Image (spheres, helix red, strand yellow):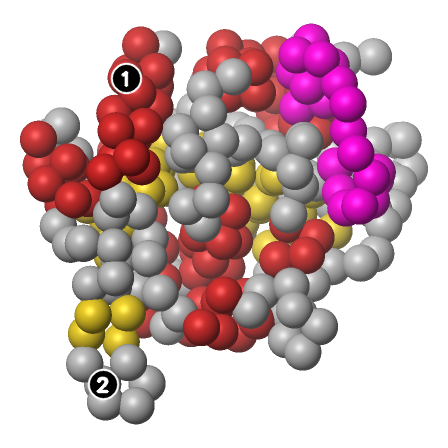
């Protein structure tokens, strides 16, 4: 049975629900989602991470989790915990190598199931890694539970920035606040000479954010270690790499903004 809205309200009573979105695939949205969730957990916030990409679940690989979720006494699904973050993904159930060939209504129903039939522990933040584009999953989240806000991930290329504008327009059309943009693959620091190189041009994310009245939350560089996520030699790089100060700063910036707009509950842990 699909739970009703009162169940969502109870599950997410104290949580800021933040969608990480991109209108275009291949910009590193899932990696940013994982880094953001890990950064919030390190700051002392109770954090959940939900994989909303039903067709292409990547969180099991990104977070180096191979176990299947258990079941609570009441029959609900237990989230999987990793590095202080509670996780849920269709990849835990169907397997990351198995295709999911569902139509739109089934996608929406699965997202409702993950929100209402997972035994989430109390959260300050729930980060939802959305699939690319502006389809059924995004609309379901906006309509059923509402979102505290959305973070848009892009790269500096013009084609990605053009898609960003369409994604932002969609969120604004359904009254979801766009909290800011993150420009991924923004530049590259040569490990040999230490010089900064603008591989995909420069300034596009900042210019676009300024023109649309948004904050550029972070400029994340190309990083060879992060590029090896999922490789057999280093499958859990996400768990170690977020200690980079840029990811910590991104988590702190987002938390500070939402703390001002949406005060934390009294029992929320202190930030570390």
- Can I make out residue 187 in this image? yes
* x and y, in percent, of residue 32 in the image: 44, 52
Residue plotted at (34% across, 19% down): 171
Q: Could you classify mark 1 by the number of other residues whose Cα lies within 10 Å: few (under 14), some (14-19), or many (20 or more)?
A: some
Circle number at residue 169:
1
Q: Is the residue 61 above or below the residue 226 in the image?
A: above
Residue linked to disc 2 = 194
Q: Are marks 1 and 2 in contact (CB under 8 Å)?
A: no
Q: Earlier in the sequence, mark 1 or mark 2?
A: 1
* x and y, in percent, of residue 226 in the image: 48, 67
Marker count (numbered) = 2
Which residues lie in the magenta part?
90-111
Q: Is residue 185 left or right of residue 60?
A: left
Residue 106 magenta-highlighted: yes
Q: Is residue 157 left or right of residue 153?
A: left
Of 105 and 121, which appears nearest the observer?
A: 105
3D distance between C-alphas at marks 1 and 2: 39 Å
At numbered mark 1, what does the secondary structure look like: helix, strand or loop? Answer: helix
Of 150 and 136, which appears nearest the observer?
A: 136
The answer to which quarter of the image holds residue 262 is top left
Of 143 and 72, which appears nearest the observer?
A: 143
Quadrant location, the C terminus: bottom left
Quadrant location, the N terminus: top right
* x and y, in percent, of residue 12 in the image: 55, 30
Residue plotted at (18% across, 54% down): 201
Circle number at residue 202:
none
Q: Is the residue 230 above or below the residue 85 in the image?
A: below
Residue plotted at (60% across, 33% down): 52
Residue 43 magenta-highlighted: no
């Amino acid at each position: 049975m699909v739970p009703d809205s009162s169940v969502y309200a109870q599950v997410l009573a104290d949580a800021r629900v933040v969608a990480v979105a991109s209108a275009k695939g291949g910009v590193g949205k899932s990696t940013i989602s994982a880094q953001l969730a890990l950064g919030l957990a390190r700051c002392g916030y109770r954090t959940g991470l939900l994989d909303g990409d039903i067709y292409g679940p990547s969180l099991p690989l990104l977070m180096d989790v191979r176990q299947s979720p258990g079941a609570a006494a009441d029959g609900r699904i237990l989230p999987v915990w990793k590095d202080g973050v509670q996780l849920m993904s269709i990849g835990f159930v169907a397997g990351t190598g198995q295709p999911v060939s569902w139509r739109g209504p089934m996608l929406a129903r699965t997202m409702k199931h993950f929100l209402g039939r997972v035994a989430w522990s109390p959260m300050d933040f729930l980060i939802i890694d959305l699939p690319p584009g502006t389809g059924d999953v995004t609309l379901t989240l906006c309509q059923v539970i509402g979102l505290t806000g959305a973070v848009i991930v892009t790269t500096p290329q013009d084609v990605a920035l053009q898609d960003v504008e369409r994604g932002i327009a969609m969120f604004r059309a359904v009254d979801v606040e766009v909290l800011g943009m993150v420009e991924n693959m923004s530049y590259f620091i040569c490990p040999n000479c230490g010089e900064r190189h603008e591989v995909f041009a420069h300034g596009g994310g900042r210019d676009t954010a300024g023109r649309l009245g948004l904050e550029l939350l972070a400029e994340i560089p190309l990083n060879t270690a992060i590029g090896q996520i999922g490789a057999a030699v280093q499958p859990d790089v996400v768990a170690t790499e977020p200690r980079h100060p840029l990811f910590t700063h991104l988590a702190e910036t987002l938390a500070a903004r939402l703390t001002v707009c949406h005060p934390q509950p009294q029992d929320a842990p202190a930030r570390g």
